[in-house]
Image: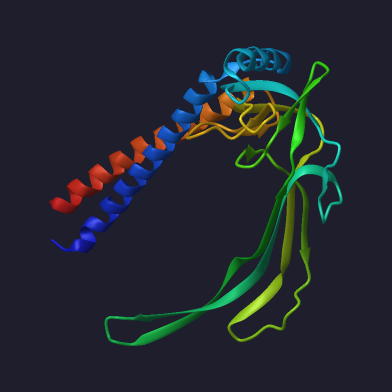
Amino acid sequence: MEGSQLLIPAVLGAGAVATGLARRHQAHRLATLLDARSTSVAELRDLQAAVAEQMGAGSFRERVKLQGSIACNEPLTAPWSGEPCVAFTNTTTALMEVREERTSTDSAGNSTTEVSWERREEMLQQLERRCPFELQQGGQNLLVDPEGAELELETVFNQVDPPTTANTGLYRQLGTRRVESLLRAGGPVLVVAECSDASGSLQLQAPEGTGLFVVRRGSEDDFSRTIRRWRRVWMASTWGLSVAAAVTLVLALR
């Protein structure tokens, strides 16, 4: 039996493992979300004051989730859209067609070369910026340090500029795409994070070790439904790829 006969079941099996790990990751995200305690800014401030009085400042730490609105006195300005934001990502990609040559040989030994143009996008530059902001809730604010957070960004700028270089026999430039995504400096958000005063002041931040640190629009129910949907998708993919791998392996061994 040739090794090439086992290639397809091996690829399908590797895909099943990959999708299984993705499903497990989503299950862990859901468990972490459900485990975080729903709270408010006022309650966190009261708890931190009580812990500081009994154990000293810098001792408070808890995994929490809470809704509020973004407040930022000195927001960033997104370079291309000019919009105020607390985070943005700019990407520049080259749009091009690359010349591909494929040579095939028939049973008589005659070679034929086919020429085609394959469209590709090549990353040229990426720029990311974030700034601290506050979560505003019920007349009280709580600092958010966004470093390490999974942010839900909104695409606000998507433009293709004309080519800047001449075409050659190997490639043809179609243009340069510029895309800007950001988190606006305002509006309601859900924050899942660790609340701690270890830095000297109470803030929401990335947890020590593993755990969720998410800033996104929508409610906890919306976030939970999204995670559950992806978990179902990866589970179905795992089962489908596993069955396909088993079937192709049986056929290869006959």
Report the side of 9 relative to 71 (left or right): left
Q: Is residue 246 above or below residue 68?
A: below
Q: Which residue is at the front of the view, 108 or 150?
A: 150
How is the rendered protein coloured?
rainbow
| Residue shown at the point (59%, 35%) measured from the top left | 206
| Residue shown at the point (34%, 35%) measured from the top left | 239
Dividing the image into 4 quarters, which one contains the N terminus?
bottom left
Total marks in image: 0
- Quarter of the image holding residue 67? top right
The image position of residue 185, as x and y in percent, is: 81, 37
Q: Is residue 111 above or below residue 74?
A: below
Q: Is residue 46 above or below residue 96?
A: above
Q: Which residue is at the front of the view, 192 or 221?
A: 192
- Quarter of the image holding residue 54? top right
- Quarter of the image holding residue 223? top right
The image position of residue 254, as x and y in percent, is: 12, 51
Report the side of 3 relative to 142 (left or right): left
The image position of residue 18, as x and y in percent, is: 38, 44
Q: Which residue is at the front of the view, 2 or 188?
A: 188
Report the side of 120 relative to 202 (left or right): left
| Residue shown at the point (76%, 35%) measured from the top left | 133
